[in-house]
């Protein structure tokens, strides 16, 4: 009996320890990020996580990658972080155009997500924009912590301005 209690207690402590390390990310809407980019004295780049509610890899990336303390700290220091549901129903205004939900097949898609993903609707895909809201690059697929940080630093530290990706990544 004492052994079972000890094992349960250890499992509980491990669970609490893992939860304590998870980081809360200040996700914002597209509108909030655009507003901040226009009003901050020193605006940040914008990072957009394009996801769907049914995407298992999206949920895994949220849990494994974005909740990593190093990732969340770096991203929040260098980017306005936006979550964008690729199947969201609310219209989005940007650069004089209204992007809407388009019913298609069983689910449909949002025109803004399709524009950001350049018509390649795969999830998860993350998108990096510069301070002037210009596209730097969409990056499709699940990313583990280290590869993700390498990509994020490439854009966040402005390395992309001086080196192409192949040179930076050592490929």
Image (tube, helix red, strand yellow):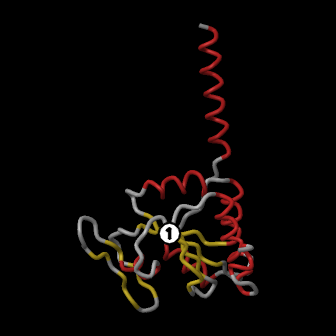
Q: Label 1, secondary structure: give it.
A: strand
Question: Quadrant of residue 65 in the image?
Answer: bottom right
Which residue is depicted at the point 40% across and 69% down? 86
* Coordinates of residue 85 in the picture (x, y in percent): 41, 67
* Coordinates of residue 122 in the picture (x, y in percent): 43, 69
- 88 vs 95: above or below: above
Image quarter where the C terminus lies is bottom right
Question: Quadrant of residue 120 in the image?
Answer: bottom left
* Coordinates of residue 107 in the picture (x, y in percent): 28, 66
Q: Is residue 33 left or right of residue 79?
A: left
The residue at which mark 1 appears reads as 125
Residue positioned most to the top? 1
Name the foreground residue: 21 vs 64: 64
User: Alpha-carbon neighbours of circle 1 within 10 Å: few (<14), some, or many (≥20)?
Assistant: many
Question: Quadrant of residue 76 in the image?
Answer: bottom right
* Coordinates of residue 60 in the picture (x, y in percent): 52, 52
Name the foreground residue: 95 vs 5: 5
- 161 vs 168: above or below: below
Residue positioned most to the bottom? 96
Q: Is residue 4 left or right of residue 150?
A: left
Which residue is depicted at the point 66% across and 78% down? 44
- 67 vs 95: above or below: above
Residue positioned most to the front? 171
Name the foreground residue: 166 vs 89: 166
Which residue is depicted at the point 53% across and 61% down? 142
Q: How many marks?
A: 1
Name the foreground residue: 127 vs 36: 127
Image quarter where the N terminus lies is top right
């Amino acid at each position: 009996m004492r052994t079972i209690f000890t094992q349960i207690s250890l499992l509980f402590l491990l669970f609490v320890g893992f939860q304590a390390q998870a980081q809360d990310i200040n996700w914002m809407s597209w509108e909030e990020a655009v507003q901040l980019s226009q009003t901050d004295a020193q605006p940040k780049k914008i990072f957009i996580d394009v996801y769907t509610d049914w995407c298992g890899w999206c949920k895994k990336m949220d849990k494994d990658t974005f909740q990593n303390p190093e990732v969340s700290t770096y991203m929040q220091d260098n980017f306005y972080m936006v979550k964008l549901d690729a199947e969201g129903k609310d219209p989005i205004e940007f650069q004089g155009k209204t992007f809407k939900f388009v019913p298609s097949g069983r689910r449909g898609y949002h025109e803004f997500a399709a524009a950001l993903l350049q018509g390649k609707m795969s999830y998860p895909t993350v998108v990096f924009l510069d301070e002037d809201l210009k596209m730097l690059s969409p990056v499709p697929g699940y990313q583990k912590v280290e590869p993700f940080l390498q990509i994020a630093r490439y854009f966040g530290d402005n390395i992309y301005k001086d080196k192409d990706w192949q040179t930076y990544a050592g490929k």
